[in-house]
Image (cartoon, rainbow, N blue to C red):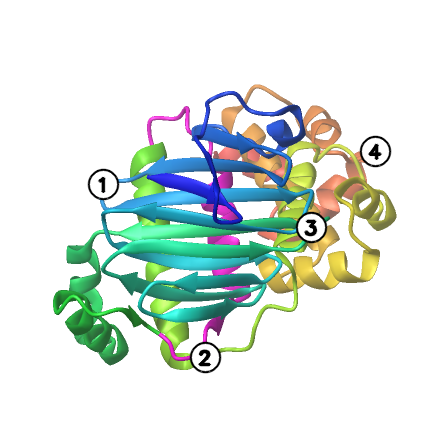
Amino acid sequence: MVFSFNEHEKFKSTREIPAELIRYVLPGSQASAIANEYLKLLLQEFYSAHCKVFYAVYLVDKKTSFRLRDEGPLFFFCLALQHDRYLEIAGLGKVLIKEGQFNLIYAPLLDLVSAHEDGREYITLNLRYDLNVLQEWAPYFPKLAAFLEKVQAGKPAALLSHPEWLTKEIQDIIYRIMHTPSNTTSYQPYFDLLLRTLLFHLLNQSVQRLPASIYTHYEIDGIQAARIMIKKNIRYHFVIREISQKVGMNEFKLKNGFRELFGNGVYEYLRTERMLEARLLLSNGGKNVKEVAALTGYKSVNSFIKAFKKKYGQTPGDYRKRA
């Protein structure tokens, strides 16, 4: 595989990650980088049984064109997460995938030119599913069946005549794929399941054409980070302003995005998490009601009892006796 810039300078990737790119490195990935006067590129690879995942971050210092060539075919879903992708692909010509859009692309020869403006940060997610996985879904999605016919005939093809938008469901799955802890025994089957779920939503969007998510890649990340912050600190009562400052979002978008993504508001989510933790602590039998109230963030035992009874229809003491 050959990387070149502005049609004449060739570079090879290295495992040494420049300091500017360290903060983008995700746990569990195989990371490599290219750094020159034009840009700093971080490429992270993840693998499942039926899909290869490539997460790329480009920090562009000077306007440049980046060319990638190889003997094998080009065959992948391209998702533009940050900034528009201006591509020129052998056999397909010029291809524009706007920020928040995706398409499935095939070319018999991997010869791709990607144009980048200076001073910008580009983030892309490329998914290379095995052909047999796509064939499993072809009977349910006629566009995919027509696309695969061209692939089998060795003809350049795009799944969609115009790229489609990423929905909030798709962005949520992308976040989970990128942030699932890789050091657990359940990681690999869960990772595989997420990738299959993502494939379904991408194919479904190619048919249904649901409205684009009104939230950017970074905003979805911020909303997810807010959820994790609340979940890990249920004893603390965050105010919306404090959470929005920590995750780098304005309060309005955080409140509305949280409700849209998780089905309830920030404070409703906090109360639910507190009640789930309270029920777990009471079931274990090692803590009394007063201790459980304190551990779940209630300053008043009476407030805790009222909240628990409203949620579960019985007092914490009664629940503890029956657990």
Q: Which residue is mark 2?
A: 209
Which residue is more in the foreground, 286 or 160?
160
Foreground disc of the pair 2, 4: 2
Which residue is more in the foreground, 89 or 293?
89
Where is residue 63 shown, x and y percent of the image? 66, 51
Image-based side of 105 in relation to 306, left or right:
left
Tell me which amino acid carries mark 2: Arg
The answer for how far apart the CA atoms under marks 4 and 1 are is: 49 Å
| Mark 3 Cα shell of 10 Å, populated few (<14), some (14-19), many (≥20) | some
Where is residue 209 shown, x and y percent of the image? 45, 79
Where is residue 263 shown, x and y percent of the image? 60, 62
> Residue 259 sits in which quadrant?
bottom right
The secondary structure type at the circle numbered 4 is loop
Residue 299's label in the rendered image is 4
Q: Which residue is mark 1?
A: 49
The secondary structure type at the circle numbered 1 is loop
Write the residue at 57% across / 41% down. 276
**Mark 2 in CB contact with mark 4 (< 8 angstroms):** no
The answer for how far apart the CA atoms under marks 3 and 1 are is: 34 Å
In the image, is residue 239 part of the stretch drawn in magenta? no
Res 26 visible? no
Q: Which residue is mark 3?
A: 120
Tell me which amino acid carries mark 4: Lys
The secondary structure type at the circle numbered 2 is loop
The secondary structure type at the circle numbered 3 is loop
Tell me which amino acid carries mark 1: Ala
Res 177 visible? yes
**Mark 1 in CB contact with mark 2 (< 8 angstroms):** no
Q: Which callout, 3 or 1, points at the residue further toward the start of the chain?
A: 1
* Relative to 54, residue 76 above or below: below
Foreground disc of the pair 2, 3: 3
The range drawn in magenta is 160-186
